[in-house]
Image (cartoon, rainbow, N blue to C red):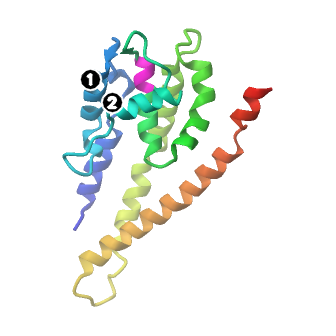
């Protein structure tokens, strides 16, 4: 059903993102959606999945999660914010994403002194240094042993369900921790009204 190589290939495709790949020129909406959908094509579950659409981007701008484009063009900072939204929205609610990103954007979006790119590069470097691949591959190898001593016909299937169970439990615990951390952040509404 799966192999260590199968999992390694998926992890390599996901980890291939580099901030230097983002164009240094301003892009129109169609160029932004094409870039993002091409860049993260490996994360699609199905070929016809849309990762980022014009409607999504417009909604992020209307809700002020994404700063408005400049003369209908999106800067490198805009694209970095959209990438962060893309990663977070798959795990968190948009309200949580807003609470998480808004203070950072107020301070670093188009900040020449401390550019948003530097902040995001620090996040990416830390994530790469943490290398989740090792712990995930350990779970892959451990799940392959779950039914070693059990005589069942559908061992491959049950081992795959075992891996999915382990990964789901890990994700569940991490999601709860993430939500508790977000809840511990200062409340923007109270902060803005002061």
What's the magenta bit mostly, secondary-structure-wise? helix
Could you tell which of marks 2 and 1 lies nearer the N-terminus?
1
Above/below status of 130 relative to 19: below
Mark 2, other Cα within 10 Å: few <14 / some 14–19 / many ≥20: few
Q: Residue 123 or 75: which is nearer the viewer?
A: 75
Answer above or below: position of 38 versus 145: above
Q: Residue at x 40, y 57 (%)?
A: 136
Above or below: residue 88 compared with residue 28:
below
Measured as percent of width and height from the top left, residue 51 is found at: 31, 40
Q: Which mark is residue 54?
A: 2
Where residue 157 sits in the image (x, y, percent)? 26, 76
> Regarding mark 2 in the picture, which secondary structure is present there?
helix
Quadrant location, the C terminus: top right
Label 1: which residue? 30
| Labels 2 & 1 near each other (Cβ < 8 A) | yes
Q: CA distance from mark 2 to mark 1?
A: 8 Å
Quadrant location of the N terminus in the rendered image: bottom left
> Horizontal and vertical percent for residue 115?
53, 16
Q: Determine the residue positioned at 29% across, 55% down.
A: 7
| Magenta region | 76-80
Dot 1 lies on which element?
Answer: helix
Is residue 71 left or right of 193 when viewed as pictured?
Answer: left
Residue nearer the viewer, 152 or 42: 42
- Specify whether residue 193 is painted magenta: no
């Amino acid at each position: 059903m799966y192999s260590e190589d199968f999992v390694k290939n998926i992890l390599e495709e996901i980890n291939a993102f580099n901030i230097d790949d983002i164009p240094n020129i301003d892009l129109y909406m169609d160029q932004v959606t094409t870039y993002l959908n091409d860049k993260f094509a490996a994360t699609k579950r199905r070929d016809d999945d849309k990762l980022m659409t014009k409607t999504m981007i417009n909604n992020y701008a209307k809700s002020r999660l994404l700063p408005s484009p400049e003369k209908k063009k999106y800067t490198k900072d805009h694209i970095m914010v959209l990438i962060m939204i893309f990663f977070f929205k798959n795990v968190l609610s948009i309200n949580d994403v807003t609470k998480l990103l808004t203070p950072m954007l107020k301070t670093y979006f188009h900040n020449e002194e401390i550019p948003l790119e530097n902040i995001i590069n620090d996040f990416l470097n830390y994530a790469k240094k943490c290398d989740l691949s090792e712990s995930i591959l350990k779970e892959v190898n451990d799940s392959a042993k779950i039914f070693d001593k059990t005589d069942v016909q559908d061992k491959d299937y049950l081992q795959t369900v075992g891996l999915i169970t382990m990964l789901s439990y890990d994700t569940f615990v991490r999601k709860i921790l993430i939500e508790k951390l977000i809840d511990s952040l200062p409340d923007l509404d109270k902060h803005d009204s002061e």
